[in-house]
């Protein structure tokens, strides 16, 4: 069901892009905005692992340095049918984890020091399985596609804003100017909401897949409960552009509206996992 939902949301982004491009610049406007967005997001997709790991001062560890963590990931990756990812530890007390890398062969699983301290072995298995599911489901690629479409929409909206400011409306009438202003305001909001809905859908899928790989849905639920509470008590100094990558939203304490959250409510995720058998 979540796979179908992701497809529908990606289609919605595509349709929104075509509508806005057709209104403002026709087919040429769509192509220009899409190419610019694709170039920007291609770079992000290709080098995202290096950028994010450096941003959070993550350190790669060997089997000798973190034998239990390394062994768990190796066993779970084998169960998931994945090659062994690189293992990183992020300094900091806030418990969290994320996966990155452009494909299965270049995948990375990173956990914070805080996560290793507060979770027991079974809970850790659940979290690691969740991250491996993101890799298996190619969520980095899907996120990049969504970001490209959303980026193109935002770029067209920006063009519409400047056109409205300089009085270049469609057919140069007041209705055209008003339409451009409305588009400039509403289009980025709509694109952002759809992009975040895609992220939330992928989190549900990763929870389900993680529970199946580890065989411990209740332990993953327990881990999410601990991580959610800790993220509120010990906020993480995270960049909003990377918030969607973490297993729980590192910006939970700053969120004003659940509508604009990159993650589903922790309570709903926990309830779904506890219903699994």
Image (cartoon, grey):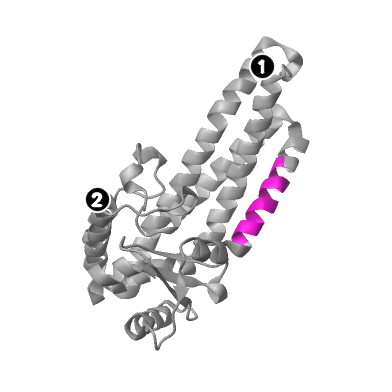
Q: Is residue 253 shown left or right of residue 8?
A: left
Asked which quadrant contains residue 188, the reply is top right
Residue 232 in percent (x, y) is at 27, 50
Residue farthest along the top direction in this orientation: 174
Element class at badge 2: helix
Q: Mark 2: few, some, or many residues within 10 Å (few <14, many ≥20)?
A: few
In the picture of the structure, the residue carrying the numbered disc 2 is 267
- Locate the C terminus by quadrant: bottom left
Asked if the magenta segment contains residue 62, the reply would be no
Closer to the camera in the image, 6 or 220: 220
Q: Earlier in the sequence, mark 2 or mark 1?
A: 1
In the picture of the structure, the residue carrying the numbered disc 1 is 177
Element class at badge 1: helix
Residue 167 in percent (x, y) is at 72, 16
The vertical placement of 268 against 210, above or below, is above
Mainly helix, strand or loop, the magenta region?
A: helix
Residue 6 in percent (x, y) is at 48, 51
* Separation of residues labelled 2 and 1 (CA atoms): 44 Å
**Residue 17 visible somewhere in the drawing:** no
Residue 265 in percent (x, y) is at 30, 48
**Residue 243 visible somewhere in the drawing:** yes
The vertical placement of 247 against 214, above or below, is above
Q: Mark 1: few, some, or many residues within 10 Å (few <14, many ≥20)?
A: many
Residue span colored magenta:
33-45
């Amino acid at each position: 069901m979540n796979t179908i939902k992701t497809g529908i949301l990606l289609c919605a982004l595509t349709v929104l892009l075509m509508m806005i491009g057709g209104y403002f610049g026709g087919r040429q406007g769509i192509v220009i905005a899409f190419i610019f967005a694709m170039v920007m997001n291609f770079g992000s997709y290709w080098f995202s692992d290096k950028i994010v790991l450096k941003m959070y001062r993550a350190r790669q560890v060997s089997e000798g340095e973190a034998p239990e963590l390394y062994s768990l990931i190796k066993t779970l990756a084998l169960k998931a049918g994945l090659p062994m990812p690189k293992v990183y530890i992020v300094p900091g007390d806030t418990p969290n984890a994320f996966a990155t890398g452009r494909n299965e062969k270049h995948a990375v699983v990173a956990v914070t020091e805080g996560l290793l301290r507060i979770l027991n072995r079974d809970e850790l298995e659940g979290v690691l399985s969740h991250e491996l599911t993101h890799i298996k489901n190619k969520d980095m690629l899907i996120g990049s596609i969504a970001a490209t479409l959303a980026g193109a929409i935002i770029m067209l909206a920006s063009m519409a804003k400047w056109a409205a400011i300089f009085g270049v409306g469609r057919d140069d009438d007041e209705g055209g100017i008003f339409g451009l202003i409305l588009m400039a305001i509403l289009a980025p909001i709509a694109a952002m909401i759809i992009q975040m809905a895609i992220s939330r859908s992928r989190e549900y899928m990763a929870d389900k897949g993680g529970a199946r790989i580890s065989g411990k849905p209740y332990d993953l639920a327990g881990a999410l409960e601990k991580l959610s509470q800790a993220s509120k008590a010990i906020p993480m100094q995270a960049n909003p552009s990377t918030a969607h990558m973490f297993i729980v939203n590192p910006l939970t304490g700053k969120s004003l509206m659940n509508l604009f959250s990159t993650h589903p409510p922790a309570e709903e995720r926990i309830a779904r996992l506890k219903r699994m058998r």
